[in-house]
Image (cartoon, rainbow, N blue to C red):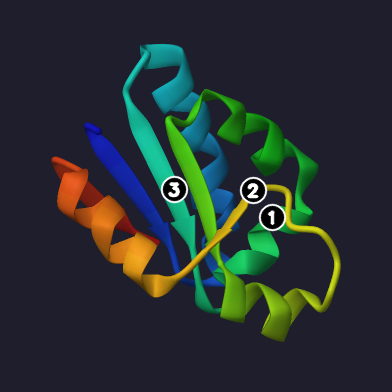
Amino acid sequence: MELMLHVTSADSAPLLLPLARACGRAGVAWGCFFTNDGVRALADQAIVAALASAAKAQVCEHSWTHHMGTGTAPVELASQTANSAMMAEARRVVSL
């Protein structure tokens, strides 16, 4: 994977959307992991739609439950171990 976007803050949503769309347009192999209150960005349907071009999109299961309750996550639920694995396979990481 060329680029991983690591979403750790709900305040990063305005930055995430254009970055995700740009990655999709450029054909970049990219992935995204949501943790902490960054999981709140997944309430934005435009962000969820932009994730369609991602090679991998995951959300921390604990953070999802803590901030979003029991609703169904729009991306794969994963652990912090999966977060570490995604970082290890990415050539570049951008933390938001």
Please name the residue shown 50% across and 71% down the image. Answer: 35
Give the quarter of the image for residue 1. top left
Mark nearer the N terminus (1 vs 3) = 3
The reply to whether discs 2 and 3 touch (Cβ–Cβ < 8 Å) is yes
The reply to whether discs 1 and 3 touch (Cβ–Cβ < 8 Å) is no
The reply to whether discs 1 and 2 touch (Cβ–Cβ < 8 Å) is yes
Amino acid identity at mark 2: Val
**In the rendered image, the vertical position of residue 35 relative to residue 29, given as above or below:** below
**In the rendered image, the vertical position of residue 50 relative to residue 28, given as above or below:** below
Q: Where is residue 76 shown, x and y percent of the image? A: 60, 51
Amino acid identity at mark 1: Leu
**In the rendered image, the vertical position of residue 27 relative to residue 40, given as above or below:** above
Q: Where is residue 37 shown, x and y percent of the image? A: 59, 77
Give the quarter of the image for residue 10. bottom right
Q: Identify residue for label 2.
A: 75
Label 3 packing within 10 angstroms: few (<14), some (14-19), many (20+): many
Q: Nearer the viewer, residue 65 or 27?
A: 65
Q: CA distance from mark 1 to mark 2?
A: 8 Å
Mark nearer the N terminus (2 vs 3) = 3
Q: Identify residue for label 3.
A: 32
Q: Nearer the viewer, residue 12 or 67?
A: 67
